[in-house]
Image: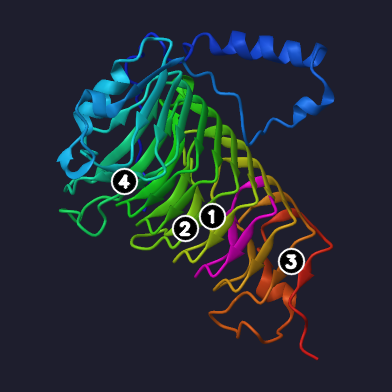
């Protein structure tokens, strides 16, 4: 089923992102600087610990009435703490405890703000019947950090049966966002969404979003969905055990017709046990690098591309997936597949321990795919 997302931007606060009209001037200036002053290493745009500009003030949500006792609705109190920060932003600290959240209202973060959860703090969704909800919403903001703790959905206690868009974190039309050391689970839809607001000439893609040491597990639709976005870096994270409603992937690149998703890097992640594909990629997706990831025990393909293009798949390990470790479908093109260990996949029709000829069970390339190069990959041994 096609994913439906917000496409209209809301009014921007004083600390919000730059205006749409300013974008061409900013981009042009940045390109000019890069051509003259930046070293060659600047081509490596990704950083697991990026510099996020956060304001100096710190507030504690308990000073605004949050209880964290597992029964009281703490939504308004936490939002009040967030809104108490000046335009320069700051840190909102959530001490240990279980904080019940009305996700139909969501916690809305502003620019230059850090939401810091104690490792033993949990934001838990109050059961609702909505087809769409968010625990934390980052829209039209820049320089935002979400760190620590857990966010838990209501999938087992959800009061409705319609829809599939209950999120833990929704990042849309926002720049320089870091999410780290966060555990997302049990959501009616996706653990997290990264995408855009608006469309056509008003499209505002998220830019420079980093996920570091994030775990997204046992969500109903996706561990993570990526819509129109650029400069997205996902590192040292785990996306596992998605099951409930299609596509049931660990990560789904699905910008659809809203706009492109490009300049994305996934490195040293684990994608496992998902009821669909480990990762799936659709049209309007390009310039993606997969490096050092592990795809294991997914019921579908380890990694499947449908019409994505210009990708590097280097140094990954795919094993014991229900279908092939890698599948390049439809008109996927310009992909370099090198130095991967792809063994004992296609367990839904072959024994995981049997030898059956590596190419068909571990790598599959459609007849319409083109400019696919392969080198130095270790595949399942052929039957002697």
Location of mark 3 (residue) = 341
Label 1 Cα neighbours within 10 Å, binned few <14 / some 14-19 / many ≥20: many
Q: Residue pushed farthest bottom?
A: 384
Question: Which of the numbered marks, if any, corresponds to residue 165?
Answer: 4
- The residue beneath circle 2 is 249
The residue at the point 24 percent across, 21 percent down is 80
**Residue 1 relative to residue 269: left or right:** left
- Asked if residue 133 is positioned above or below residue 42 in the image, the reply reads below
Q: Earlier in the sequence, mark 1 or mark 2?
A: 2
Q: Residues within 10 Å of mark 2 (few under 14, many from 20)?
A: many
Residues at discs 1 and 2 in contact (Cβ within 8 Å): yes
The residues bearing labels 4 and 3 have C-alpha atoms spaced at a distance of 35 Å
Percent from the top left, x then y, of residue 81?
A: 28, 22
Horizontal arrangement in the rendering, residue 213 relative to residue 71 (left or right): right
Inter-mark Cα distance, 1 to 2: 7 Å
| Magenta-colored span | 291-309
**SS of the residue under disc 1:** strand
Measured as percent of width and height from the top left, residue 347 is found at 57, 79
Q: CA distance from mark 4 to mark 2?
A: 14 Å
Query: The C terminus appears in which quarter of the rendering?
Result: bottom right
Q: Position of residue 6 (x, y in %)?
A: 34, 32
Measured Cα–Cα span from mark 3 to mark 1? 19 Å
Quarter of the image holding residue 27? top right
Q: Residue 340 in magenta?
A: no
Residue depth check, mark 3 versus mark 2: number of the one nearer the observer: 3
Q: Looking at the picture, how far across and down is residue 219, in whole percent?
A: 37, 56
Seen in the picture, residue 47 relative to 87 is either above or below; the reply is: below
């Amino acid at each position: 089923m096609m994913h439906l997302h917000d496409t209209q931007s809301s009014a921007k606060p004083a600390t919000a992102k730059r205006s749409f009209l300013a974008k061409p001037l900013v981009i042009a200036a940045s390109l000019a600087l890069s051509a003259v002053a930046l070293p060659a290493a600047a081509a490596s745009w990704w950083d697991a610990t990026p510099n996020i500009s956060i304001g100096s003030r710190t507030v504690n949500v308990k000073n605004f009435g949050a209880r964290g006792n597992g029964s009281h609705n703490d939504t308004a109190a936490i939002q009040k703490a967030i809104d108490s920060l000046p335009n320069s932003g700051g840190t909102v600290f959530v001490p240990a405890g279980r904080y019940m959240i009305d996700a139909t209202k969501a916690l809305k973060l502003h620019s230059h703000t850090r939401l810091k959860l104690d490792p033993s703090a949990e934001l838990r969704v109050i059961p609702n019947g909505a087809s769409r909800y968010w625990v934390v919403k980052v829209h039209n903001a820049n320089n935002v950090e979400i760190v620590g703790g857990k966010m838990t959905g209501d999938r087992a206690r959800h009061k409705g049966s319609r829809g599939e868009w209950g999120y833990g974190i929704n990042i849309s039309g926002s720049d320089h966002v870091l999410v780290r050391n966060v555990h997302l689970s049990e959501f009616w839809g996706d653990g997290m969404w990264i995408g855009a607001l608006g469309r056509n000439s008003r499209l505002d893609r998220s830019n420079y979003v980093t996920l570091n040491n994030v775990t997204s597990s046992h969500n109903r639709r996706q561990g993570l969905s990526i819509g129109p976005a650029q400069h997205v870096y996902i590192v040292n994270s785990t996306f596992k055990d998605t099951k409930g409603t299609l596509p049931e992937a660990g990560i789904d690149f699905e910008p659809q017709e809203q706009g492109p998703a490009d300049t994305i890097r996934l490195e040293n992640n684990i994608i496992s046990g998902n009821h669909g594909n480990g990762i799936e990629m659709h049209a309007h997706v390009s310039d993606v690098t997969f490096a050092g990831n592990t795809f294991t025990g997914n019921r579908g393909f380890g990694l499947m591309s449908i019409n994505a293009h210009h990708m590097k798949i280097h140094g990954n390990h795919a094993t014991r997936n229900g279908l092939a470790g890698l599948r390049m479908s439809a008109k996927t093109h310009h992909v370099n597949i090198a130095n991967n260990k792809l063994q004992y996949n296609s367990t839904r029709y072959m024994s995981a321990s049997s030898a059956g000829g590596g190419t068909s069970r571990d790598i599959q390339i459609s007849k319409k795919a083109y400019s696919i190069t392969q080198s130095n990959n270790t595949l399942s041994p052929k039957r002697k």
